[in-house]
Image: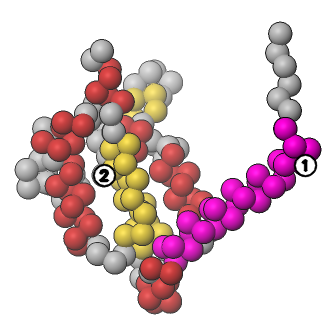
Amino acid sequence: MVARARWLVPGCRPVLVVVVAVALLGLAAGPVGAASDQVRGHRPLYYLALGDSLSRGVQPDAAGQNHPTDQGYADDLAKVARLVLPQLQLVKRGCETEETTASMINGGRCTYPNGPAPDGAQLAEAEAFLRAHRGSTVLVTLDIGANDLSRC
């Protein structure tokens, strides 16, 4: 038997929607305030997506082969963030292959657009990007660990 979900307090769903909307606007206001000079000057702002294949939007094609796409969570988040920051550029530095927590720190799985990071690690690549774009990177996401469990 499937029971319909009921709100404990009548009319609380609209309140919940408003609370979530205000929270999202508050999160968006942080980068806007922190990067106001870039907003006025229309300099690029960056969203750095780090981690495993999820950060790259990797999905299987019709033949079942995995490929990076522009249909992952980072792409969706960037699309929403551009409503507030139109000049936001998504930079994906996640690893398309089976990145683990250890390989993210120690390297050995991925290469990057400007060649391998100094020690071959995604973490070093991320640090270099953040140093090079200090003050212009307004959002960073990191997902890692799913491949740590795949060996179990």
Picture quadrant of residue 3: top right
Q: Residue at x 52, y 77 (%)?
A: 32
The x and y percentages for residue 78 are 52, 59
Along the line of sight, the residue nearer the viewer: 125 or 59 = 125
Where does label 1 land, which residue?
Answer: 11
Image position of 19 (left or right of 28): right
- Circle on res. 93: 2
Q: Nearer the viewer, mark 1 or mark 2?
A: 1
Amino acid on which the number 1 mark rests in the picture: Gly
The x and y percentages for residue 9 are 87, 43
The x and y percentages for residue 115 are 15, 54
- Where disc 2 sits, the SS reads loop
Stretch in magenta:
7-32
Is 15 drawn above or below residue 152 in the view shown? Answer: below
Residue 110 appearing in the image:
no
Q: Residue lying farthest right?
A: 10
Using a 10 Å C-alpha cutoff, classify the residue at mark 1 as few (fewer than 14 neighbours), some (14 to 19) or many (20 or more). few
Residue 45 appearing in the image:
yes
Using a 10 Å C-alpha cutoff, classify the residue at mark 2 as few (fewer than 14 neighbours), some (14 to 19) or many (20 or more). many
Q: Residue lying farthest front?
A: 9
The x and y percentages for residue 82 are 56, 67
Question: Who comes first in sequence, dot 1 or dot 2?
Answer: 1
Amino acid on which the number 2 mark rests in the picture: Arg
How far, Cα to Cα, is label 1 from label 2? Answer: 43 Å
Asked if the residues shown at circle 1 and circle 2 are in contact, with their CB atoms under 8 angstroms apart, the answer is no
- Where disc 1 sits, the SS reads loop
Q: Is residue 15 magenta?
A: yes
